Image (cartoon, rainbow, N blue to C red):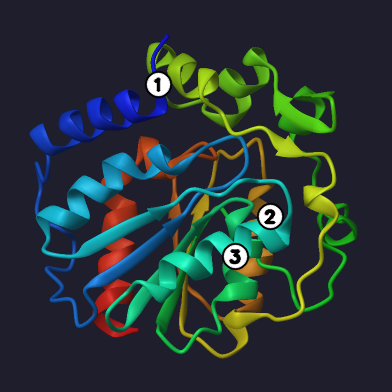
Amino acid sequence: MISRRTFSAAVTAGAAASLFAASPRAQVHPRVRNVVLVHGAYADGSSWSEVIARLQAAGLRPTAVQNPLTSLADDVAATRRVLARQDGPTVLVAHSWAGTVISEAGGDPKVSALVYVAARAPDAGEDYAALAAKFPRPPASDGLVTSDGFAELTEEAFLNYFAGDVDPAKARVLYAIQGRISTTLFGSRTTAAAWKSKPSWYAISKNDKTTAPELQRFLAERMNAKTVELESSHVSLISHPKEITELILEAAANG
């Protein structure tokens, strides 16, 4: 059985070996050097490995949060602990569920910019489930199974809908280490919306079957985010790490 640490090290080594086949799009020069990366549901911090290696190669100092996925309060606390260790301005980045986390925690004075990757971005106190219900229902929603108060995706849903453009062998490893979530997690509501006061960027996954692309576009427009659209599944941070890295570098240069 492969451990999370072993998998993370292997992925990072693979990413470092193939970094920057092409130069970053804008040849940006980051003003901010610290980056905090927050993972979403059905994942853990190793999901950022490909992006981390590229950020390090560009001279930035990335740190991945390990969310317990037990409650919004617990995930926000984990993120704030990592933010507290940063020595200056920091770009705060979220994938998927973590968009809720950084919307709550992103008001920290160290946070210079927010980057959302196929991520939730609720307004303060908003019923996000009711908002999402106004948009097409993604098929991954039907792949959840629950046990003892926690939920996870079935292998079929994970491979076909969550990580549909990731090599199947790699996707199966990601499936094996997926972060199980509390069944009450998605019912949480934020008390703040940091994107209202911080410059924001958003990466939309055009082929997303976990979060409707139409919903992502709505969220990005509502927050007036600088936006890119990728031909990607929900996990663009894994299948399109170069483009996600470029977006973070732009936020670091301009946030």
Instruction: Identify the disc placed on residue 77.
Output: 3
In the picture, measured across the screen, residue 125 lies left or right of residue 96, that is right
Q: Is residue 2 visible?
A: yes
Q: Quadrant of the N terminus?
A: top left
- Residue 18 lies, in percent from the top left, at 11, 34
Q: Of label 3 and label 1, which has the lower sequence position?
A: 1
| x 58%, y 74%: residue | 105
**Which amino acid, mark 1?**
Ser
Q: Secondary structure at mark 1?
A: loop
Q: Is residue 37 left or right of residue 216?
A: left
Residue 160, numbered label: none
The image position of residue 186, as x and y in percent, is 79, 51
Q: Is residue 176 above or below residue 212?
A: above
Q: Is residue 243 above or below residue 197?
A: above
Which element carries disc 2, helix, strand or loop? helix
In the figure, residue 47 lies in which quadrant?
Answer: top left
**Disc 3 on helix, strand or loop?**
helix
Q: Which mark is residue 214?
A: 2
- The mark that comes first in sequence, 3 or 2, is 3
Numbered circle sitting on residue 3? 1
How crowded pointer 1 is (Cα within 10 Å; few <14, some 14-19, many 20+) is rated as few
